């Protein structure tokens, strides 16, 4: 069924803003030419729509616009679109591929959250960031292209994207948010580009097959030694790969062990901490079920919440 403009669509006075599509719409919906904006919640909950045709000239897709359109299989975002709101496509469980316009300026957080069938996604550098929660729960996502110009990956951006086997981070990247690649089980290795100057807590937590983190040799902020990521000056241990096994010795001179640094490193048996360490972050050793030996030296004056309580 194709719904035309005169069949219960709700518009503003001049027909440039589509406010609402009826919840009982079924099959294919064609948004007419002349519409430049899809309002917040415009298609929200239209669970029987399978295909949407959008007109060139559309500029804005509102907040929660297609949330809950769980039967939607096809939508092509026009080149003219510059704004996609928060949680715009959340829960569109049949969408498989998404390609965003090269001149898109704003992509809201959680835009594709819980789109469990998405297999590939391409984000242009013009958006500047992968917003937080953007692909959270996209368990089928395999291929991601991040354009040059992207400077930040927000917290939880790729949480539970278990099918991603490789991702190339752009050279323009400066910030990797906390928990951003949490539970990305398919990742075996990842390279930190030269310009990255900030990495949040637990960026690769529970990524159980991650064996190797590398850092561009021109990066002046971070360095990888063995299976662990450190601040360049070696005063802070950021994280250890989940795949780390056996004994691990924190190098002398490290002063701070970051939050979740050894989170879920279940194959570690012994961790040796030097007297140079003065602080240990929250849940630093949580999930280290195989530990036989761990001694917190008296130099540690700041022990984070649940740092050792839930080792087993």
Image (cartoon, grey):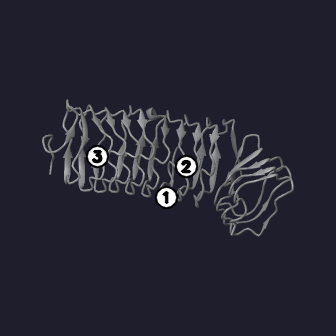
Judged by depth in the image, the label closer to the viewer, 2 or 1, is 2
Residue that label 3 marks: 75
Q: Residues within 10 Å of mark 1 (few under 14, many from 20)?
A: many
Q: Residues within 10 Å of mark 2 (few under 14, many from 20)?
A: many
Q: Please tell me whether mark 1 sits on a helix, a strand or a loop.
A: loop
Q: Position of residue 280 (x, y in %)?
A: 75, 53
Q: Please tell me whether mark 2 sits on a helix, a strand or a loop.
A: loop
> Is 193 or 263 nearer to us in this picture?
263
Mark 2–mark 3 Cα distance, whole angstroms, equals 27 Å
- In primary-sequence order, the first of circles 2 and 1 is 1
CB within 8 Å, label 2 to label 3? no
Q: Residues within 10 Å of mark 3 (few under 14, many from 20)?
A: some
Q: Residue lying furthest top in this view? A: 14
Q: Residue visible at 73% across and 40% down?
A: 232
Horizontal side of 250 relative to 198 (left or right) equals right
Q: Position of residue 269 (x, y in %)?
A: 74, 67
CB within 8 Å, label 2 to label 1? no
> Is 168 or 235 nearer to us in this picture?
235
Q: Please tell me whether mark 3 sits on a helix, a strand or a loop.
A: strand
- Label for residue 26? none
Q: Where the C terminus falls, by quadrant?
A: bottom right
Q: Position of residue 105 (x, y in %)?
A: 41, 32
> Is 312 or 208 nearer to us in this picture?
312
- In primary-sequence order, the first of circles 1 and 3 is 3
Mark 2–mark 1 Cα distance, whole angstroms, equals 12 Å
Horizontal side of 37 relative to 222 (left or right) equals left
- Label for residue 180? 2
Q: Residue lying furthest left in this view? A: 6
Q: Residue visible at 65% across and 59% down?
A: 263
> Is 96 or 189 nearer to us in this picture?
96
Q: Residue visible at 82% across and 53% down?
A: 300
Residue that label 1 marks: 162
């Amino acid at each position: 069924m194709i719904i035309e403009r005169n069949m219960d669509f709700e518009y503003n006075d001049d027909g440039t803003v589509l406010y609402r599509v009826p919840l009982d719409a079924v099959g294919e919906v064609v948004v007419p030419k002349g519409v430049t904006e899809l309002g917040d919640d415009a298609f929200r909950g239209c669970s029987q729509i399978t295909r949407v045709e959008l007109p060139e000239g559309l500029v804005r897709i509102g907040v929660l616009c297609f949330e809950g359109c769980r039967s939607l299989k096809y939508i092509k975002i026009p080149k003219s679109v510059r704004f996609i709101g928060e949680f715009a496509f959340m829960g569109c469980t049949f969408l498989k591929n998404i390609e965003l316009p090269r001149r898109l300026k704003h992509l809201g957080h959680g835009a594709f959250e819980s789109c469990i069938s998405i297999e590939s996604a391409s984000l242009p550098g013009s958006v500047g960031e992968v917003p937080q929660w953007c692909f959270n729960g996209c368990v089928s996502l395999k291929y991601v292209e991040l354009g040059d110009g992207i400077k930040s990956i927000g917290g939880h951006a790729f949480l539970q994207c278990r099918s991603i086997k490789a991702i190339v981070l752009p050279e323009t990247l400066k910030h990797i948010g906390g928990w951003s690649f949490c539970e990305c089980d398919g990742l075996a290795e990842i390279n930190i580009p030269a310009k990255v100057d900030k990495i949040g807590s637990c960026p690769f937590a529970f990524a159980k097959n991650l064996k190797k983190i590398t850092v561009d040799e021109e990066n002046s902020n971070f360095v990888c030694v063995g299976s662990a990521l450190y601040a360049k000056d070696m005063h802070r241990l950021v994280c250890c790969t989940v795949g780390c096994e056996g004994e691990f010795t924190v190098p002398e001179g490290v002063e701070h062990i970051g939050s979740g640094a050894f989170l879920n490193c279940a194959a570690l048996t012994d961790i040796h901490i030097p007297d140079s360490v003065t602080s240990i972050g929250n849940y630093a050793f949580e999930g280290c079920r195989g530990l036989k030996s761990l001694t917190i030296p008296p130099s540690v004056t700041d022990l984070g919440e649940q740092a050792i309580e839930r080792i087993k």
